[in-house]
Image (cartoon, coloured by chain):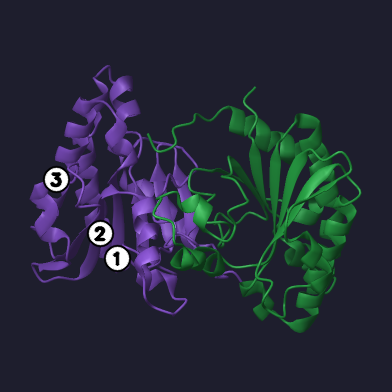
Chain colours: A purple, B green
Amino acid sequence: MRIPNHIGIIPDGNRRWAIDKGLSKESGYESGIDPGLLLFKLCEKLGIKEITYYGFTVDNTKNPREQIKAFTEACINSVNILLKEDAELLVVGNTKSPMFPKELLPYTTRRVFGKGGMKVNFLVNYSWKWDLEHLKRSKSVSNNITNQIQSCDVSKMDLIIRWGGRRRLSGFLPVQSIYSDFYIIEDYWPNFKEKHFYDAINWYDAQDITLGG
Amino acid sequence: MRIPNHIGIIPDGNRRWAIDKGLSKESGYESGIDPGLLLFKLCEKLGIKEITYYGFTVDNTKNPREQIKAFTEACINSVNILLKEDAELLVVGNTKSPMFPKELLPYTTRRVFGKGGMKVNFLVNYSWKWDLEHLKRSKSVSNNITNQIQSCDVSKMDLIIRWGGRRRLSGFLPVQSIYSDFYIIEDYWPNFKEKHFYDAINWYDAQDITLGG
């Protein structure tokens, strides 16, 4: 079976899930924490080498204040939970903005927890503009763009899985997503089921690799 | 009805279509020319403002010589056909490489044909690396990335339609595809049918816009 090296996760639909339950929008984010750990465990079992969670973006910080508070807390809690696992953790995002949570500053260079193993990247206060703008400060003459962006420690993604039915990248790592296969799950992220993950993995196995050829 | 301003077209599956017909791989490209004009006419009818065809890429020029000849000719012919329409044509690609067809050099700045109207962009010998590398030469302090890449005359795409079943961007305009909705058609491009286009348009109408919010 062809297993992706690196999976990107767009955990969308938290607010719509909350609305469907008759809850306030922001209360959806907390219910997105457990699925993150479940997914990590499944990836570990399958020997996935790297996983990237799309936490929140600079765009998202234009949302109402109570939502910002809720998704920021959910990101902090998610990272704290993963610290107890065997993982090599990296938080990627614009630390110079006040929206970046101070609690996550220690993880903005990659750190090994437990026995290490899977690379786990967490995008927090991330922005594709911030990511690409870094190229303007690059002194390198190489055309290896991947090494000259802010998110240079995140490798190319083989498979992107998006929950919540939308078929778009919404600014998720424009360089690392160049050749990614893109799998959509209609269910909202808080409704995460093992089956979602295995459906995506099986679908990926049936795709061919061309890398633009 | 919510009509996209700008549609990106990934006309994939030419070679697989040819193989299915028992033809040589390269003979599929010629059969991709008529669909391009048909699609243009449908966009015109609907009042679409801009359309971008993914012609061929620098990656593609690593293919066998007879394929390179065939897809280069198909691109030249497609552009020549569109010159007879009311359109504002632009060819975008790396003109400094010998793989860029000289016949298309006159169209690398936008030119108006007939009564003008729809912007039609054609990516020819395009490369996402070439596109983004331009940022390294930018003197601007603005974070408006879109104005500082090689393809700056191509606006953000609202809808991307890909033929041939693959669910990936394959290096198609990484900046302009950031917020695009992505619609996949299983049929190969030479099997283009009006229904494909209207299915995509109707699907797009049912999506909501968030622009990362």
Find the distance from the CA under tag 3 to the CA under tag 2: 16 Å
Chain at numbered mark 2: A
The answer to whether residue B68 is left or right of residue A91 is right
| Chain where mark 3 sits | A
Q: Chain of mark 1?
A: A
Query: Considering the numbered disc 2 on the image, is that residue within a helix, a strand or a loop?
Result: strand
Quickly name the residue at label 3.
A101
Residue A97 coordinates in the image, percent (x, y): 21, 46
**What's the amino acid at mark 2?**
Asn
Local packing at callout 3 (Cα closer than 10 Å; few below 14, some 14-19, many 20+) is some
Q: Position of residue B208 (x, y in %)?
A: 50, 29
Q: Quadrant of the C terminus of chain B?
A: top left
Q: Disc 2 vs disc 1: which is toward the camera? A: 2
Quickly name the residue at label 2.
A121
Find numbered disc 3 in the image and state the secondary structure of the residue it sits on.
loop
Is residue A208 shown to the viewer in this render?
no
What is the x, y in percent for residue B86?
A: 86, 41
Name the amino acid type tagged 1: Glu
Give the CA distance from mark 2 to mark 1.
8 Å
Within the image, what quadrant is residue B1 found in?
A: top right
Question: A107 above or below B52?
Answer: below
Residue at position x 66%, y 73% from top? B60
Contact, mark 2 vs mark 1 (Cβ under 8 Å): yes
Q: Residue at x 66, y 43 (%)?
A: B7
Spatial CA distance of label 1 from label 3 is 23 Å
Question: Along the horizontal axis of the image, is B36 left or right of B152?
Answer: right
Callout 1 and callout 3 share a chain: yes
Question: In the rendered image, is residue B71 in sight?
Answer: yes
Along the polypeptide, which appears first: circle 2 or circle 1? 1
Mark whose residue sits in front, 1 or 3: 3
Q: Residues within 10 Å of mark 2 (few under 14, many from 20)?
A: many
Q: Amino acid at mark 3?
A: Pro
